[in-house]
Amino acid sequence: MDPSELAYAGIARQAELIAAREVSARELLDLYLARIERFDPLLNAFRVVFTERARLEADQADARRGAGEARPLLGVPIAVKDDLDVAGEVTAWGTNAHGPPAQADAEVVRRLRDAGAVIIGKTNVPELTIFPFTESATFGVTRNPWDLQRAPGGSSGGSAAAVAAGLVGAALGSDGAGSIRIPSAWCGLFGLKPQRGRVSLAPRPRAWHGLSVNGVLTRRVADTALFHDVASGTTDIDRDSAPSPAQPFSTSAATPPRRLRIAYSTRFPPGVIARLDGDAARALTETVELLRSLGHELTEHDPDYGLAAIPQVLVRYLRGIHDDAAGMAHPRRLERRTRGMGRMGAVIPEALLERSLAGEEQFTRRLNSVLEQHDVLITPTTATPPPRIGQFQGRGALWTLNMVAGMVPYNGVWNVTGQPAASVPAGFGADGLPRGVQLVGRPGDEAALLALAGQIEAERQWPAERPPEFA
């Protein structure tokens, strides 16, 4: 296979090629290491690359394959977002306020290793994973492969840039208010925020008081489905327990959906000052027409956000940032803006947080009323294209929070409810940058989203699109 084709093939196809002995794990790893050496100086997607350690893991995978061993991801490289623990490496969180190296892998990393994956490195994040752009004083600026003067999004920005540029086939992400879906939309990727409790957060329980979940960013729906087949499952530390899927996720992704009733909406939650970009609106309209042509029933129907939607997000988000900042080994080293966000979280009393948590069930029922008559809701993933590099440099916490909230108003409410939501590529704007459409499923129903996303992918063939400079 042509090296570029192999680099962009995705983890499901790469696993098949390794199992069939058409390529070795070491050959695939060395291809990615060469691309990282060539391209990552332009992108700064990786904080650290485990060159020698990954080569040992790839050689071990080839030995296992030679001995007849079969694992779902045997020999396939995967990157890890730098808010997840990898044994022997610091979890930097985009800051020099971090503590010592982790003593053990995070549970999701452990499951990937058990499936045979080779951990190639850790990807950059904004400090404490706060914002939807990936720039930090400690580790610098991460750039979008589609336009090096634009952000890839955040907080899984390094993961998105690495996958979009063909530096790895898949990369772990986390999503506390859109941090998988936003960079997926801005980098032309598929990104699923799974049902809360689907993928373990261990050793970190109830991240951001239940807002955040772990997942993956990929080029193909089948790759995300394979990841969830091997990585889903919780431990005693995870208080949330997602329902077991009726069938493997990979089966759902490969099965076209029945005729679905789909609601669509561009309405913003009350309290957000935002303006919908014309290209984002067109991406939604074109997706609606595509789905109608595929036989689905589409109806414009706004979610009932109520007045509590944004406060529900902000209470947990800001208090979670405060708790993370206070828990850093060296909190005085945090950036000024991060300390400002922490101070905003500090004014949220425990009683208000408890009221927010207690009101989650009622809020979820209200927001999900749109899904009582519909199987899926679709919205734009973001209201705007990605910001320019340095656009928020030197800005304070409150100013930055208000500005980014208007760029990404559609995401955080579904973290409060905990249900699955995904971003699917939806073409390009006049600026040449990718746009995305968000699919929201009923609680526990990732299967519907995977099936629908797989159907859209078959029609649009977005994996064939590659940033020209990195093709």
Image: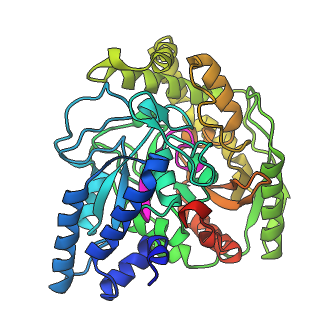
**291 and 218: which is toward the camera:** 218
Question: Which quadrant would the N terminus be assigned to in this image?
Answer: bottom left
Q: Is residue 194 visible?
A: no
**417 and 20: which is toward the camera:** 20
Vertical arrangement, residue 419 with respect to residue 222, above or below: above
Question: Which quadrant would the C terminus be assigned to in this image?
Answer: bottom right
Q: Hey, which quadrant is residue 417 in on the image?
A: top right
Q: Is residue 192 magenta?
A: no
Q: Position of residue 9 (x, y in %)?
A: 48, 74
Q: Which residues are magenta?
A: 168-181
Q: Is residue 170 magenta?
A: yes
Q: Position of residue 346 (x, y in %)?
A: 46, 13
Residue at the image position 29 percent from the left and 59 percent from the top: 119
Vertical arrangement, residue 74 with respect to residue 36, above or below: below
Residue at the image position 20 percent from the left and 47 percent from the top: 87
Q: Position of residue 54 (x, y in %)?
A: 24, 61
**464 and 263: which is toward the camera:** 464
Q: Hey, which quadrant is residue 416 in on the image?
A: top right
Q: Position of residue 358 (x, y in %)?
A: 52, 29
Q: Is residue 389 visible?
A: yes
Q: Is residue 15 left or right of residue 415?
A: left
Vertical arrangement, residue 198 with respect to residue 157, above or below: below
Q: Is residue 454 left or right of residue 38?
A: right
**157 and 246: which is toward the camera:** 157
Snapshot colouring: rainbow
| Count of labels in the image | 0
Vertical arrangement, residue 459 with respect to residue 330, above or below: below
